[in-house]
Amino acid sequence: MNINLPTFNETYQALMQQSGLGVRDYVSTVEQAVKAYSGGTTMQADTGSEQMTKSAAGQLFRMVGLPVQVIDHFNDAPDLQVAMVQHRLAKLPDEKKAEQIICRGSVVGDNRTRIDAFLSQDYVPVSNMQLLMALREALGEIDARVHKSQIYQRQMHIRIVTPDWWHDLGGGDPAYTGLSIMNDEKGKGGVTIKVAVARVACFNYVVAEEPVFEHGHRWLDQSALLNGVQEGIARLNDAAAGVAGRLRDMRDTNVNDVAGMLTTMGNEMGLPSYSVEAAKQWWQDAGAIPNLFMVVQAIAFGTDKMTSRKGFQWDRREYAEQQVFNMAKTFQETGRLELCSCPRCHRPMSVIGEDGEYVNAEYSVAE
């Protein structure tokens, strides 16, 4: 099938440049990092004051065993905050003080460094550049087209479709085999590559629950990363065929109250109201066909509205695209609409607040 999207190789250099833009990482020790704390969410470095994100500040406090809520309670008394943190530091064993950590930083405004995360030496996320290099080699001669990509605050999300690999969703309705790729250099979750089936008519996506490749953030050399990605991509099209077949079967499942089902699904998944309303309007515009397949496609369309607005990130979109498929399968089998509650599916979704920081996004230093 012909498709007017850039190839992965055509966008590779731009993605690599974005991945390295504004990155400023350095190695420190627990003692050095804690001693640099100057109250609130600031640190005093040789180059001046450095701001920490709220999640990074929480990591710093946890290094000395202080709950974030305790420090936050004294936000109007930074000197007291410093005294509390230094008091706890003094009680740490010498080996803990000397433990090396990686400070993940980004360059912001006037060449200042913002600390995004403190990570232990045992907890080194795969870099976006590493993953991009592995993807380029693993995709090889496959006609891989980049539909969407986002690199923001060290998080990378890429949607790729493969025009040479496609499946029939019923009635001559084709869908591309795709990849949904996610990584976070700050340590939230791990690398995941999941099967995505994209309906050609509208580029609505459904994402499979099981990744074809995933890796928790522990050290992984480039050859091992490449082997894992290659093995995953080798299984990609067969896995997509299974998803497409299940979607095709959903055309035969009638739904009596489509608007009610869309509302229930939206509420269960925590979708914003505008997303649910967009799903309902899409269903009407697409012919108001009352079957489960069109319900899934409507929700998939609604999730696209989330990532078109500032503040909603790709992990939330992928969560919805994955959960709607699970909920539809459960409805087929049991007649009930239920979220999948496994840890892979049922996780908090991150949203960017007005200050540009993630809300409900937990980052922690691995012990």
Image (tube, rainbow, N blue to C red):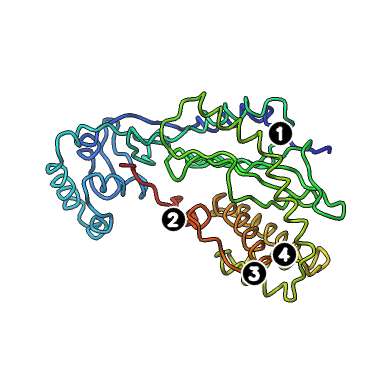
Ranked by sequence position, the earlier of labels 4 and 1 is 1
Q: In which quadrant will I find the C terminus?
A: top left
Residue type at numbered disc 2:
Val
Q: Is residue 235 above or below residue 283?
A: above
Q: Secondary structure at mark 1?
A: loop
The residue singled out by tag 1 in the image is: 144
Q: Nearer the viewer, mark 4 or mark 3?
A: 3
Residue type at numbered disc 3:
Thr
Q: Position of residue 335 (x, y in %)?
A: 66, 71
Residue type at numbered disc 1:
Ala
Q: Is residue 138 left or right of residue 37?
A: right
Q: Secondary structure at mark 2?
A: strand
Ranked by sequence position, the earlier of labels 1 and 2 is 1
Residue at x 22% of width, y 34% of height: 32
Residue at x 45% of width, y 51% of height: 358
> Visible in this render: residue 258?
yes
Ranked by sequence position, the earlier of labels 1 and 3 is 1
The 10 Å Cα crowd at callout 3, few under 14, some 14 to 19, many 20 or more, is few
Residue sitting farthest toward the right: 172
The residue singled out by tag 4 in the image is: 295
Q: Position of residue 147 (x, y in %)?
A: 69, 41
Q: Is residue 97 left or right of residue 367?
A: left
Residue sitting farthest toward the front: 333
The residue singled out by tag 2 in the image is: 359
Q: Position of residue 238 (x, y in %)?
A: 71, 41
Residue type at numbered disc 4:
Val
Quadrant of residue 71 within the rendered picture? bottom left
Do callouts 2 and 3 mark residues in contact (Cβ within 8 Å)? no
Ranked by sequence position, the earlier of labels 4 and 3 is 4
Do callouts 1 and 3 mark residues in contact (Cβ within 8 Å)? no
Ranked by sequence position, the earlier of labels 4 and 2 is 4
